[in-house]
Image: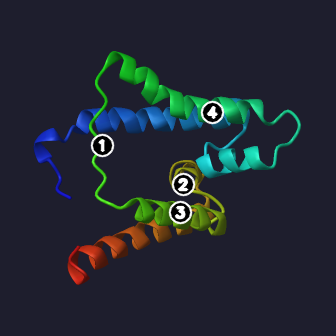
Amino acid sequence: MMIAWTEFTPWSALAGGVLIGIAAAMFVLLNGRIAGISGIVGGLFRPAAGDVAWRVAFVVGLVGAPLVYGLFAALPTLQIDASFGALIGAGLLVGVGTRYGSGCTSGHGVCGLARLSPRSLVATAAFMGAGFATVFVTRHVFAF
């Protein structure tokens, strides 16, 4: 995998980050809920009365927004350099990790850190450290 520095767009990345921050802040201020995807989706598997509609709307918005965007602009070309089995394994590991970590990167990294949660600080440091270690090992030790 190579980074195409000529395609790097810091302003759109900054705008996206600001929009995510505003959306997460509005969600907690208006609904009193944390915009952590694993918690939102997990709540659909153990539904409580009056708690399903907003969760479904959130997930539909996550899936539907890129589809609507694709009606007006070209979506980027996806290139995945992994086998189907590797993708399945990675997805299962991420799912197990979010259960053990009591949340996902969006819940801890965006929302938890914004609330100054010590648990989220530790979780985010663990996510980042594991990511750094994985990249180092796969790129420099095993030279994939």
Query: Quick one: label 1, few (<14), some, or many (20+) residues within 10 Å?
Result: few
**Distance from the alpha carbon under mark 4 to that under mark 3:** 20 Å
Residue ranking furthest to the right: 49
Kindly identify which residue carries mark 1: 78
Q: Residue at position x 37%, y 23% from top?
A: 70
Which callout, 1 or 4, points at the residue further toward the start of the chain? Answer: 4
Could you give the CA–CA distance between mark 2 and mark 1, rounded to whole angstroms?
30 Å
Q: Is residue 53 above or below residue 37?
A: above
Count of marks, rendered view: 4
Query: Which is in the foreground here, disc 3 or disc 2?
Result: 3
Q: Amino acid at mark 3?
A: Val
Relative vertical location of residue 136 with respect to residue 52 in this rendering, above or below:
below
Q: Give SS at disc 3.
A: helix
Label pair 1/4, CB-CB below 8 angstroms: no
Q: Which residue is mark 3?
A: 94
Q: Which residue is outermost to the left?
A: 6
For disc 4, the marked residue is: 58
Residue tagged by mark 2? 113
Please tell me which residue is depicted at 75% across the width and 30% down the height of the picture.
53
